[in-house]
Image (tube, rainbow, N blue to C red):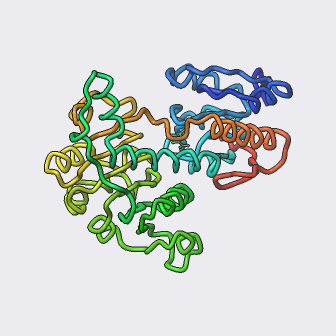
Amino acid sequence: MKDILTDILISENIQGAGVDALGARFRVAFQPDLWKDPALLAEKVKQCRALIVRNQTPVTASLIDAAQELLVIGRAGVGLDNVDYKHAEKAGIVVSFTPDQNAISVAEIAIGMMLSLARFIPAADADTKKGNWNRQRFVGTELYGKTLGIVGAGKIGYLTARRAMAFGMKVLAYDPFLSRDNILLSEVQAELVELDELLARADVVSCHLPATTQTVGLLNRERFMSMKPGAFFINTSRGKVVVEQDLVEALKAGIVGGAALDVRSKEPPQVGELEAMPNVILLPHIAAFTNEAQDRVTAAICEDVARVLDGKPALNAVKRAMPMPRVTS
Ligand code: MLT
């Protein structure tokens, strides 16, 4: 083994008590802007045993191959689309993530987006701050009695549905991995349906999908055009599941009555037609950004990275929980 100068490399802005605790036991290099420089990242990663990232560091197969001392990759968050975890698995590296830690925050913002769309909250705020008092212009709709369609009924979808129940909404769910007798679905009295049926019946469609080969581009022209006319569309999951130009067309046609997007197909996005639409709410991928969620995410990922460096199994491994010796031939 080479002389290791750094135990843990943090290539994005991940801070908090968990990182401080790691710093007391390991040599930690905190380089929050390193993700912007892939060549320097590839150089630095050669010397470390652990790499902690959020969603901006591309952890590619070639980066993994360059990191011959690496034992564990910690993804501070739930989405794994920036980590080639299958390649890491083959290379014997543990990939740990934090599947449940930010779910409440994401579910809460999905509800916030629903209310914002239904009651024009951002638009009415901006208009009133201009000195106007336009009460008739902002006549909204109630959520009570409306139908929410959850596309992807994992933890975040379930928590969103639970909160929607408190508003008196009926819940439809589409998730090819769940069966009708799923206990969480029955808890929120959700009807499990096919995607086409959900889109045709829901007044609000809320997307909670990972970006995979099956889901990228799933929300396309045909699917938007088959939505219940005037329905709202919300995405707090991954931008790539939506074909943005197709959403623009459906908004222009009035089929989609309003959209709220926390995530974009390219981040940061280029300013385009969505930015100019009054019935569109855009956020900079902040659904998981609450103090509580970030404290939990950081604590959980730091604990798992420390466990692996201490020779213990990871608690939240994507696949393998213990590293394997690297094959270098
Ligand atoms: C997640 O995947 O955990 C959230 O989208 C936030 C993030 O990407 O870090």
Residue 295 locus on image (x, y percent): 69, 36
Q: 293 left or right of 220?
A: right
Residue 151 locus on image (x, y percent): 41, 60
What number of labels is visible? Answer: 0
Residue 233 locus on image (x, y percent): 32, 52
**Residue depicted at x 53% and y 71%:** 185
Q: 74 left or right of 196?
A: right
Nearest the eye: 61 or 51: 51
**Residue depicted at x 79% and y 51%:** 313
Point out the image quarter for the C terminus: top right
Given the current orientation, which residue lies at the most extreme left position? 253
Nearest the eye: 142 or 100: 142
Point out the image quarter for the N terminus: top right
Q: 221 left or right of 234?
A: left
Figure check: 329 above or below 38: below
- Res. 84 image quadrant: top right
Residue 143 locus on image (x, y percent): 38, 57
**Residue depicted at x 37% and y 66%:** 145
Nearest the eye: 230 or 150: 230
Figure check: 223 above or below 295: below
